[in-house]
């Protein structure tokens, strides 16, 4: 969705975004990009970096550096207050019910991985 607001001139020469079906891999608990990256996957990763650059170049700051610093500090405080990510897990569970098909399976795998990580952190 971020690319929708980017002027087309900044995206010239970049291939379409949907080259790799990440959900298909993630729904089976597999890596979408094998390591080491082959030429095609490396090019995809570089294209993503160029897309991020285009997004950043097309935006103007909405607030000051001080505001951004305060917001960053607030986010870091929230992370420290919820080191297991339970608030995030709750939010993701809410969205899980709205997903369908492969996207739902991929989200189920992500939720399961989060739960397993919590078990490791608390020593269960």
Image (tube, rainbow, N blue to C red):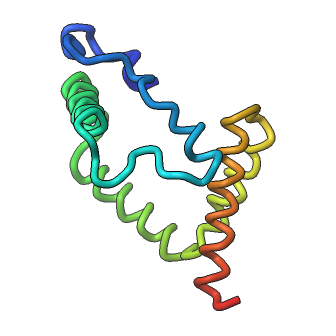
Residue lying at 38% horizontally and 50% vertically, measured from the top left: 34
- Position of residue 76 relative to residue 22, above or below, is below
- For the view shown, which residue lies furthest in the right direction? 97
Seen in the picture, residue 16 relative to 100 is either above or below; the reply is above
Q: Quadrant of residue 42?
A: top left
Between 100 and 82, the one lying in front of the other is: 100
22 to the left or right of 40: right
Write the residue at 62% across / 65% down: 114
Residue 81 place in picture, x, y as percent: 55, 76
Which residue occupies the foreground of this view, 22 or 70? Answer: 22
> What residue sits 36% from the left and 17% below the top?
16
Answer above or below: position of 121 versus 109. below
Seen as rendered, the residue at the extreme bottom is 123
Q: Is residue 1 visible?
A: yes
Q: Is residue 52 visible?
A: no
Residue 14: x and y in percent read 25, 18
Q: Is 108 situated left or right of 41 in this image?
A: right
- Give left or right: position of 78 versus 38: right
Whole-percent x and y of residue 111? 68, 58
Residue 26 against residue 71 in the figure, above or below:
above
Seen at 45% across and 70% down, the residue is 77
Q: How many marks?
A: 0
Q: In the depicted view, which residue is nearer to us: 102 or 118?
A: 102
From the viewer's side, name the closer residue of 29 and 2.
Answer: 29
Q: Which quadrant holds the C terminus? A: bottom right
């Amino acid at each position: 969705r971020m690319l929708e607001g980017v002027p087309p001139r900044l995206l010239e020469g970049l291939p379409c975004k949907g080259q790799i079906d990440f959900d298909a891999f993630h729904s089976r608990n597999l890596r979408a990009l094998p390591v080491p990256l082959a030429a095609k996957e490396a090019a995809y990763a570089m294209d993503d970096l160029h897309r991020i650059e285009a997004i950043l170049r097309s935006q103007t700051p909405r607030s000051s550096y001080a505001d951004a610093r305060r917001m960053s500090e607030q986010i870091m405080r929230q992370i420290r207050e919820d080191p297991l990510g339970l608030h995030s897990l709750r939010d993701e569970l809410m969205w899980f019910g709205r997903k369908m098909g492969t996207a739902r399976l991929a989200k189920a795998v992500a939720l399961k991985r989060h739960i397993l990580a919590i078990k490791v952190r608390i020593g269960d």
